Amino acid sequence: MKSPQNEDKKQEPKINYRTPIYLQLREIVRTKIEDGEYLPGTAIPSENDMAATYGISRITVRSAVDALVNEGLLRRVQGKGVFVVGNKIEQAIEEFSGFVPSIGKSRDQTSAREQTKLLRPAGDLFANRFRIDPEDQIYYIRRVVNQESGPVSLEEIYVPYDVIPQLNVVNSSVFSISSVFEFYGVNVSMVRQSLEIQKCSSKMAHILDAPDGVALMVLECAYHDDSGSMIGYSRTYTRSDKVSFKVSLHRLD
């Protein structure tokens, strides 16, 4: 008699030798993406794991993954793995020109590190912003953006659970909240931004390893859907000695 564990375990597709193996694996991975087994924003199994699962070489696995990377369905992130991008949709925003960070003082590469991701009650403040009940759950994400020379900024992100329930499995150290909205078909029709300068607190100076006298630029972004409801909010604290912001203005005809 089969055990419940064996009954619940999903059978992996078989690899045959009638067609090139890397093409078969490419289609297996594509199907897993389309069926939602590999969700957008999450990492697929490693080359070693897939090679062991299907009894094939790592080189063959890499060829299959490379093909999907070239198609734009997957993205390689050095040191972190290969992530599902999925089929992107067109946004309702035809043109968005807001404050854009420019890290022009260093040639260091930047990377993000997720520090915190949790579900919490909205509370009165975010219940009012998102037009939900204070007891309703929202995601809170905090991540730090680093250069080789050290921390650059700290970002806090708030998204109601009902907007993207799958956010708990998305790797926010790889993808921005704008990309995640796109992956899951959440239509952002308007983004409101504000930028101000603040004195760097001792707590923030410790987190960002900021020297004395460095001010912080605080960028707030509120994401709205077609009905005008806020569906996401982010607040980013950025070292003024590391990053500058620019904005493009367009004349309305």
Image: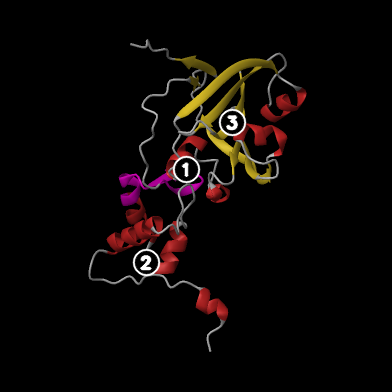
Q: Image height check: is 245 above or below 28?
A: above
Instruction: Characterize the local packing of mark 1: few (<14), some (14-19) or many (20 or more) Cα atoms within 10 angstroms.
Output: few
Q: Is residue 114 magenta?
A: no
Q: What x and y, as percent, mark residue 187? A: 44, 37
Q: Secondary structure at mark 1?
A: loop
Classify 20 as above or below 69.
below
Image-quadrant location for residue 23: bottom left
Report the label total: 3
Residue for badge 2: 56
Q: Is residue 156 above or below residue 251?
A: below
Magenta segment boundaries in residue numbering: 67-85
Looking at this rendering, what residue extends furthest in the right direction? 202
Give yes or no for contact between labels 3 and 1 (Cβ–Cβ under 8 Å): no
Q: Is residue 237 visible?
A: yes
- Residue 17 at x, y percent in the picture: 26, 71
Residue picked out by circle 3: 234
In the image: residue 252, left or right of residue 210 = left
Tell me which amino acid carries mark 3: Ser
